[in-house]
Every structure is written in structure tokens, then in C-alpha cells.
Image (spheres, rainbow, N blue to C red):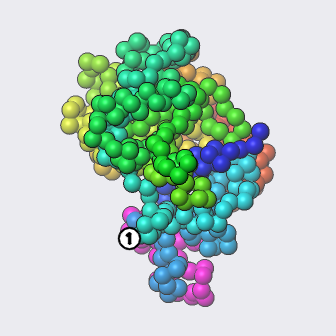
Amino acid sequence: MAITKKNRHEFIEDMFFKLENIPVEQIVGSRISLKQQGSHFYGLCPFHVDHHVGSFVVTPRKGIWKCFTCGDNFGGNGIKFISLYDGIDYLQAAFKVAYENNIITYEEYVMYAEKNYDEAYVNRLEQKQLGSKKASVTAKPKAPDAVIHNVYSVMKENCSLSEEDYKTLKSERHLSDTRIARDYFTAPTNWKQKENILNAIREAYPEYTDEILMTVPGFYMETEKGKYRLKFSFAKGIAFCIRTDTKIKAIQIRRYTVKEGQKRYTWFSSTFTDADPDPDKYLGGAGCGSPHDILYPDNTDRGIIAITEGRFKSEVLRDAGNVAVSLQGVSTWKGIQDEILHIMDSRPVRKIYLFYDSDMLGNTAVYDQSIALLKAIEITFPTIQTYHAVWKKEWGKGIDDMYFNGHIKEIKYLSSGQLKSCHEKVLKFLLEKYGVESLDEIVRSKDKDLKERFCRDLQDNSEKAIFDGEA
């Protein structure tokens, strides 16, 4: 089945969000040698005959690089560097960086990267990512948080939950009626449901004009017979509210069925309008970003924050009495320190646990993100104890599986130092076994079988080191 334009754009949007947390020095350092001096990294510029370190500078704090000899056109983020270095356009460079950092699989790389994309669309993406000041390419205006919360609240109140979806949430996800009633509904997909929702929003908030509503992620205006009409669209599935500080920040949908080129989870977003070659066809079309989802437990004060990936895993951690923070992708933790501070305003925080999936031990990109996340937290909150939760793949993939399969007591909790020490020993052993000098040779390889074998060995040997030896 052919991948639709909308599916491609949703995939690309999600990929760019995840790329934001790949350090610029890691991307640039995959092509040239860098040496750290203070808060900067320096190297020989590959774009001119450079014999002396000094003109080519990478600034991690700002996420940029710059060659002061080459001039204005030679600077930007890591993707821009790969674009220039590899001689490819910005979008192809993004695909390559995503593949090399295990954000997308080889199958996804082939499925999406090896396509012809409109040049104007690629240019809009590049200018938007690099912060162009041109009005035609800047990010679409987005409604204030209060407006988004109000609109989504009315939408939730005017949507029902089908009996089948209710059974799924109760029997498969083990959610309480209270949790279901608060956040879950069946995504509205027929025109009558949508018309009723729009009428309910206009009745509740008459001051919200169509021009305001089109700036709410998921809503947009489309021309019909020469006139613009307010619309929104949903994928078929179970929808749920993503909240930060109890306010609804976004809506996510778990699709009933997944076709080729789709992901199981998708956002209620209207950024697909960016991909249309006719710039006058749509108005609005804001993206929702990738907000963290925070669930507070009922009447407990354990002083523990549990970080995981995905709503249904965070539901389990919340039910266990933790403040559960769900990331929408392992690399989308940027800004989490501010949210921890906000949580600390209302309750003490003694410990923070990270519950990534069990295959983290064999996935170097996920492992790197886990170390970076807890390191960032440790720097900001040195008095809070932090731990990585690890377990064997055979016991279950996610923390929800561990609870439901009865293996919760098998989990080991390691500090970043313990996990890093163990991982480095295993990695050194495997690099010698495979006869390669660095992990980059494996990561950048297009030999799918080689990468899969290496990841399996890394997972298996890490599990043996942690559970059968000393970690």
C-alpha cells in the first residue's frame, strides 16, 4: 500500500522532534575530529583548506557550529553540517542523521528517505529548522496554552467512548473508570460528530473566532468553493489527553490499525498542511510539539518521580504511587528539569527512576539518551538520587509488561555510573570480537544483519554482566 503525503509528513515531523536532542557535537563529530576546550569544541574546517584549529567552532549550549573563515553560509545546526559535508539536501541529511543515531530503522530509511520531495517543501523545512525570520517559512502561529486547554476540554466533553474501546482500556490496559473518564475518548471521525464539536466550542467560547481556532493544533482552514472553512481531522482510534500541570497540552491517538508507513501512535496535529505545494490552500496548521505527559497519583507522597515512554506505561507507574512523567520518544526529554521543579513546588522529590524498555541495553541510541537524561537531571538536582531500571527482555518489554507478568521484583536499579561502567566493558569486548575500531562503524553501516547481530550480542552480554555478574 502506498504511503500517503500526510503519513510522510507526520513521520518527518516526529523525526525532527527526536533529532532535537542529538547533541550537535555528536553529529559533527561523526564526520570530523573535534577537541573540547572549555564549553566549546574545535576542529579543522572541512570546507576550506584549514591547517590551524580555531576558526571552526561547535557550541553545544546553542546547538550550533560555525566556521568564521568560510562566512555566513557555513554555520547552523548538526543537520546543516551533514548536508554540506555529504553534499545532500537538508531533508536527506536529516534522514541520514536519524538513521545513524538509531532514531529510524533501515526499513524506515528506505521507505521515506529514498523518495523525491518537492524542493520548496525541503527549503521550507530547512529555513524553519534553522530559525529563518522570513514570514513565509516561520513556524505557524500557535494558540496560547489556555485556549488549547479550553478547546480540547470541550472536545473531550463532547466525545463518547465506544463500548469496544472501553473494554480495551479495562481488560488490556487495566485502567480504572476514573482514569478512563478523565482522559480517554473515541476519536471523532464522521462529519456529524465534527460539526457538533465545532458548534459546542463556539457556544462555550464565542470569543474564539475561526481565525483563533485555526491556530489550535489539529485545526486548520481549507478553501472550498473560494471560501475558507474551519476543519479538523482525526485518525481512527482511541484518543487521550496529554497533560502538564493538569492542563491539556495535546491529544494523542492510538490507531486501531497501522498501515504501511504509519506509526501506531499519532498526534492530533495539522502540520500536514505544510506539505501541500499550494500555499494558499490552507490557513493555520500548527504543530503540537512533543509535550511531556505528567500524571499525579492519588493521595500519596512517596517523593518519587518515574520517567518512562508512552501513556500506558505511565498509567501503571502512577497507579503504583509515583508521579509519572511520560516522554513521547526517548530523545524528547528537553526541558524536563523545569517540569521537575514544578513538581517539587507541590511535593518533595527524593528519587527519580528511569523506566525505558528492556531492549535499551542493546540499543545504543536509547542507551545514550538514558545516560544523557539522568546526567542532565543529576547536574540540576545533585541532592536527588537517580536510577536506571533494567531488566531482561524475556521478562517483558515495557514496565507495564513487568507489572502484569509478575516480574516487578526482578528489576535492578543502577546508578548512571554503574550502568556506564558495565556498558563500556561489554562494548569494548564486542568491538574486539567484531574486529571494528569504533561503534560508529556499526551504527553507520547499512548492513542490516550486522547491526541486528551486534545489537543482540550487546543486549545479551549486558544482561549477563548485570544479572549474572557484577554491574
Task: Choose between 471 and 406: the one closer to the eye.
Answer: 406
Is 114 on the left-hand or right-hand side of 284? right
- Residue 242 is situated, as x and y percent measured from the top left of the image, at 41, 33
Which residue sits at x=59%, y=39%? 361
For mark 1, give the secondary structure.
loop
- The answer to whether residue 208 is visible is yes
Which residue sits at x=38%, y=70%? 38
Task: Choose between 54 and 123: the one closer to the eye.
Answer: 123
Task: Choose between 273 and 465: the one closer to the eye.
Answer: 273
The residue segment tinted magenta is 32-61
Tell me if residue 352 is in the magenta stretch: no
Q: Is residue 95 above or below residue 177?
A: below
> Which quadrant of the structure image shows residue 455?
top right
- Residue 390 is situated, as x and y percent measured from the top left of the image, at 52, 32
Tell me if residue 40 is in the magenta stretch: yes
Magenta highlight: main SS: loop
How crowded pointer 1 is (Cα within 10 Å; few <14, some 14-19, many 20+) is rated as few
Task: Choose between 153 and 93: the one closer to the eye.
Answer: 153
Residue kind at label 1, given as amino acid type: Gly
Q: Is residue 88 above or below residue 143?
A: below
- Residue 106 is situated, as x and y percent measured from the top left of the image, at 72, 48
Give the total number of marks visible in the rendering: 1
Q: Quadrant of the N terminus?
A: top right
Q: Is residue 62 above or below residue 428?
A: below
- The answer to whether residue 317 is visible is no
Which residue sits at x=43%, y=66%? 135
Q: Is residue 81 above or below residue 431?
A: below
Which residue sits at x=25%, y=23%? 301
Is 293 on the left-hand or right-hand side of 235? left
Q: Which residue is mark 1?
A: 38
